[in-house]
Amino acid sequence: MTVDNELQRPNYSLRNRAGTMIWLPDNCLDGLINLDIPNVFDNNHSEQRFPIGTIAWKDLRRFVYVEAGAAIDDLGRLVSVNNYGPGCTDHEDEDGFEGALYATASAGDTYVDVADTGALAKNDWEGGYFISFPSGGPYVCIRIAGNDIGNESTHVRVYLDDPLPAALTTSDGITVYRNPFKDVKTMGNIVGYESAIGVPLDALTSGRFGWVQTWGPAWVTAHGGSWPGDAAEQRMVYAHQDGTCDPASVKDPSSGYQQIGWLISATVSSYGDAFVFLTIM
């Protein structure tokens, strides 16, 4: 069976239970339309309960459903995206694809045939993004609903959440990015070249599923030495390479360090804090 026969588009009203709401993707694979309001403190699911990338809101906090790529047991530390860009040297097409289409696609089509001849598992790109800059139309950035098993001699068919806004030819460059919430790990696996996505509230076993907080009030372990807020005007908070956090006096913003949020509590000279309002996503 091809994946297009397994996709369902949920139609529901947002519901609030105990201050929590859930937001599913546009298209869900069969069996993953789950409208149960989750307990975001209940993690480490051995079986996937929601589509990866599902959003839950609780009071001021936003959570995203992820799959752990390694054991996550350093609570209070940032976790990161571990998918490489498809064109990265020594990691070409490891976590996506950069190249061209196998066949032309028309405006309005909801699938594309990508000229990837690698061994791709069914739905490995589900929740990722399809990117293109067609010569005759607008920029294309569409969430991937799923993919068939890769045909290792010619192509893989990729199903899109939304119709193509313009026709694509086999001469148009395309890029496929894998779901950023797959293969999530504690920061420090790709030192200096990874981006934080949030803070887990509970431990996760490798290959299991759970919730990571990406927005709102959260405790992020301070790196040590200079804490956020222990000097005047040090209110913004930045990611350190091991998943802890630093102030701008340590992580100079002009050097490109990732800002993860701002310090909530008032502080005094030489005594900072690590209660952060996350603004990652």
Image (cartoon, grey):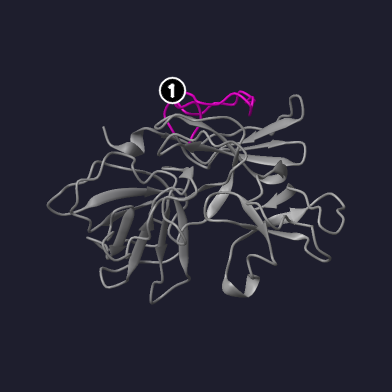
Vertical placement of residue 252 versus 42, above or below: below
Q: Position of residue 156 (x, y in %)?
A: 24, 50
Q: Main secondary structure of the magenta part?
A: loop
Is residue 271 shown to the viewer in this render? yes
Q: Which amino acid type is marked by label 1?
A: Ser
Q: Which residues are magenta?
A: 29-51
Is residue 281 shown to the viewer in this render? no
Identify residue for label 1: 46
Residue at 37% from the left image edge and 66% from the top image edge: 167
Q: Is residue 55 left or right of residue 113?
A: right
Disc 1, SS: loop
Vertical placement of residue 256 versus 15, above or below: below
Q: Is residue 110 left or right of residue 254?
A: left
Quick one: 19 or 186, which is closer to the camera? 186
Q: Position of residue 66 (x, y in %)?
A: 50, 38
Residue at 32% from the left image edge and 37% from the top image edge: 3
Residue at 28% from the left image edge and 37% from the top image edge: 2
Name the quarter where the N terminus is drawn. top left
Quick one: 188 or 106, which is closer to the camera? 188
